[in-house]
């Protein structure tokens, strides 16, 4: 997809080296079409890494996309420079009067806290409330998905017995509901996706919520994809956006902190952390984001979204 990225954003050079199709701002302005407006609420600590991961997946489409990066005004980042945030990011007060075709809310490493204990929870609730009228479809990732399920539907997260980390087999759910089959259109019967989390949601809590449906599950990782019946709220419990080495980096980080952590499952060849993992989830991840952009944003959003 000709994704429009600010000329000096560091992620641009990373994606260019991967042969990801982008366009610079000058070329984008010369095209007489209305690009999709997507806002990315990035609450991951390493914002530059997450930018590249999300933009990589949003680039696999023929649609032109205009990206707005958003960070929490009520939280001071310790791992991303203020210069980077000032150059490339907005805060909510600067965009609250705008309309967006789609929104991505990333995960965040705050699972050990209750939602109310998260320093920016009130600001996030304000943004999620705003999204119901100013965003056509919102794509929530991992902790962002749990936060969205709690805010929109009152579904609480649960603490897992141990960290769920690794690459797990998943399957699509057929015959449960048919409202959102387009999100999993073209998926293999068995596909892989990474997970990295200490918490999750109970399957029965989603099933008993009539506004929601489960679209994909895993025998080991539980619910993976859920969505509102109208497609306006998409919840992804894993990290389909992860790079090949992200789980390795997280594992090594936890070891350095002295955390008693298991080797990520089904990730390293022969469960040997000295060996380089092989990506098994790239095709599924690209298809997931492409289906969301096409069927839930581009095909549904009115030309003049007011």
Image (tube, rainbow, N blue to C red):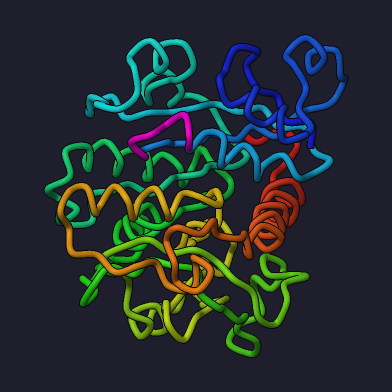
Q: How many labels does the image show?
A: 0
Q: Nearest the camera: 128 or 159?
A: 159
Q: In this view, does 268 lie to the left or right of 92?
A: right
Residue 31 vs residue 66: left or right?
right
Magenta span has 48?
A: yes
Quadrant of residue 193 in the image? Answer: bottom right
Q: In this view, does 17 lie above or below 214?
A: above
Rendering coords of residue 9 (x, y %):
57, 18
Kindly identify the residue that appears in the image at 46 percent across and 11 percent down. Answer: 87
The quadrant of the image that shows the C terminus is top right
Residue 49: give x, y in percent of width and height.
48, 35
Front residue of 188 and 165: 165
Q: Which of 192 and 70 is in front in this view?
A: 192
Residue that lies at the very extreme toward the left in this rendered image: 117
Residue range of the region highlighted in magenta in the rendering: 44-49
- Name the quarter where the N terminus is drawn: top right
- Can you say whether 291 is above or below 253 in the image? below
Residue 127 or 17: which is nearer the viewer? 17
Question: Which residue is found at the position 30% from the left and 56% from the top?
Answer: 151
Residue farthest toward the front in the current orientation of the protein: 274
Q: What residue is rendered at 24% in x and 26% in y?
A: 78
Residue 265 magenta: no
235 relative to 115 in the view: left or right: right
Q: Where is residue 185 in the image (x, y as percent from the top left)?
A: 75, 70
Residue 5 position in % (x across, y down): 65, 22
Taking the spot 69% from the left edge, 49% from the top edge, the residue there is 293
């Amino acid at each position: 997809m000709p994704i429009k990225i600010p000329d000096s954003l560091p992620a641009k050079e990373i994606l260019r080296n991967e042969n990801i199709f982008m366009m610079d701002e000058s070329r984008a302005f010369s095209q007489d079409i209305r690009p999709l407006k997507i806002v990315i609420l990035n609450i991951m600590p390493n914002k530059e890494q997450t930018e590249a991961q999300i933009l990589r997946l949003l680039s696999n489409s023929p649609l032109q996309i205009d990206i707005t990066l958003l960070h929490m005004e009520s939280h001071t980042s310790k791992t991303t420079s203020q210069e980077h945030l000032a150059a490339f990011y907005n805060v909510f007060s600067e965009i609250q009067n705008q309309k967006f075709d789609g929104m991505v809310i990333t995960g965040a490493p705050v699972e050990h806290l209750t939602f109310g204990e998260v320093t920016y929870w009130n600001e996030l609730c304000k943004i999620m409330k705003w999204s119901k009228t100013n965003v056509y479809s919102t794509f929530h990732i991992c902790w962002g998905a749990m936060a969205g399920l709690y805010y929109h539907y009152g579904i609480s997260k649960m603490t897992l017995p141990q960290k769920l980390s690794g690459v797990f087999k998943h399957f699509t759910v057929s015959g449960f509901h048919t409202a959102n089959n387009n999100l999993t259109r073209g998926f293999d019967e068995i596909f892989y996706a990474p997970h990295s989390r200490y918490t999750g949601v109970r399957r029965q809590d989603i099933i008993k919520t009539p506004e929601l449906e489960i679209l994909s599950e895993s025998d080991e990782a539980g619910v993976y994809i859920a969505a509102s019946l109208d497609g306006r709220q998409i919840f992804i419990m894993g990290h389909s956006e992860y790079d090949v080495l992200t789980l390795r980096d997280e594992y090594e980080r936890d070891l350095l902190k002295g955390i008693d952590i298991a080797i990520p499952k089904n990730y390293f060849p022969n469960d040997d952390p000295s060996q380089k993992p092989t990506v098994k989830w790239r095709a599924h991840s690209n298809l997931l984001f492409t289906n969301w952009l096409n069927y839930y944003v581009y095909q549904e959003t009115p030309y003049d979204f007011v």
